[in-house]
Image: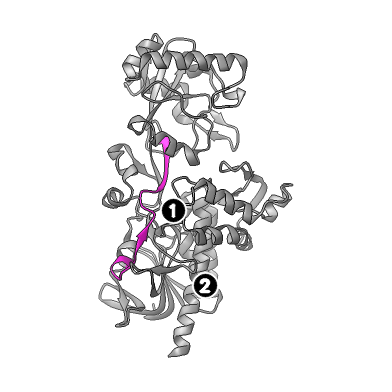
Amino acid sequence: MNTDYDVIVLGGGGAGMAAALTATETGARVLLVEVADKLGGSTALSGGVYYAAGTRVQQARGIEGDTQEAAYLYYMALTQHKVEASLVRRFCDEAADGLEWLMSLGVEFLPEGLYVSGVDGIARGHSPTGAGAAIAEALEGALGQKSVDVVLRTHVNRLLVDPDGGLRGIVVGDDAITAGAVVIATGGFGANEEFLSRYYSQAAAQGDRAWYIGARTNRGDGIVLAQAVGADMTGFNRGLLLVTPGFAKDLEVFLPGWLMYVNRNGRRFINETTEYAVVSSVVNEQLGGECFAVFDEQSRACAPRIIEAGDYPLPSWEPESLEKQTAQGKIFRGATIHELARNAGIRADALEATIESYNASCDSGQDREYFKDSTNLLPVRKPPFYAVRMRPAIICLTSAGLRIDSETRVLNVGNRPVPGLFAAGETVGGILGDCYIGGGNSVTNAIVFGRAAGRSAAAWASSRQAVA
């Protein structure tokens, strides 16, 4: 390995590999450093869905007229403008180009893989053949064809800083490796309990009930390195949590639409088929930050166990699983609604009234309260009755991170760029709001800002060489 580069990229997930490749495309000499024993990061573990508007994949599906501007307006409205507008603008404007870039590397996005991944009503979620692993493999394969030096199982001790505060490399063990610019793309901090307590209290509040599904190396290492040279942070207490019964510490993105949700007060509060992107925040606002999924014996034994859009299985909700969890006391049961409410700690009179109203909606085929589709309206009528405690306890990603400008320059607490330091991906804050915009938000974030950071870092390194 050399000891002098134009650009050093820390992190070998989607954002880091995109940054390294893009920097190399400009002619920069690049070193990519990864702490794990393989590349891919959380991108490789994800579904790989890519969120973009105005793509040729949409056009091939017959979706005409969708624009980056429409996506931007949706993004800002859903997040109530509690995000950095300049970053969201770049996300939306460059997402389609990022998709084209991935396809040029061999990732396949078929028109039939398009789906409505958020609450925007437009199919902007692009599902790749082979999920996130296919994206990671394509990026890694491209790295192998370029002159990018890659080192694995390598921990960075600190960043090297010039007397004037500019970045000039990294320290690994006792060795200094110099560079004109450094890109931090080390992922979030979902595997770091201390950081969760400090920066994502909603997730930390779940305690031992919560689990993280991203890369185990996502411990906030890059954030620590950047903070040591004065970097600022933003986006606190944000991320993506998924609601779960917690039967098994696995990933089930979707839940059966035929469930009926109530809070501790016995009141229904949401259309149960609402996209996962927003359900967790609504559940978290309920008393105790939890809800109960209520159903009857007929649904337990006979309800559908497949989400047809994508044929996603629902193993936690198989009749055998529900029977097992009930026997273990993890599901509340009652011969009557009143008994069920007492056992679960739900207000009984309100639950009885809620179920009476819900059953009337099922009988009429019209949900006049939350407008759930009639195909998912299954009455709660045949005893025994069941209630499952549901919590937003699956930690998918964290959103607090380094504050950057639209050129991906890391900003210090004085709102000025740290010279030569750039960041991308889950390491960055300010892009995700209180609500996740939909499937693909994180992968697009990684690719768009990974490419942007690689481009900016290479340009900075080149300018320093010109001055020297």
Which residue of the protein is positioned furthest toward the bottom in this rendering?
468
Q: How is the image coloured?
A: one colour
Q: Quadrant of the N terminus?
A: bottom left
Q: Earlier in the sequence, mark 2 or mark 1?
A: 1
Q: Position of residue 364 (x, y in %)?
A: 61, 15
Q: Quadrant of the C terminus?
A: bottom left
The answer, for residue 229, to whether it is visible in the render is yes
Q: Position of residue 152 (x, y in %)?
A: 38, 65
Region of the chain picked out in magenta, as a range: 226-243
The quarter of the displayed image where residue 150 is located: bottom left
Label 1, residues with CA under 10 Å away: few <14, some 14-19, many ≥20: many
Q: Position of residue 393 (x, y in %)?
A: 37, 38
The residue depicted at 50 percent of the width and 63 percent of the height is 449
Vertical placement of residue 30 versus 344, above or below: below
Q: Secondary structure at mark 2?
A: helix
For badge 1, the amino acid type reads: Ser
In magenta stretch: residue 237 = yes
| Closer to the camera in the image, 363 or 86 | 86
The quarter of the displayed image where residue 284 is located: top left
Q: Which residue is mark 1?
A: 42
The answer, for residue 36, to whether it is visible in the render is no
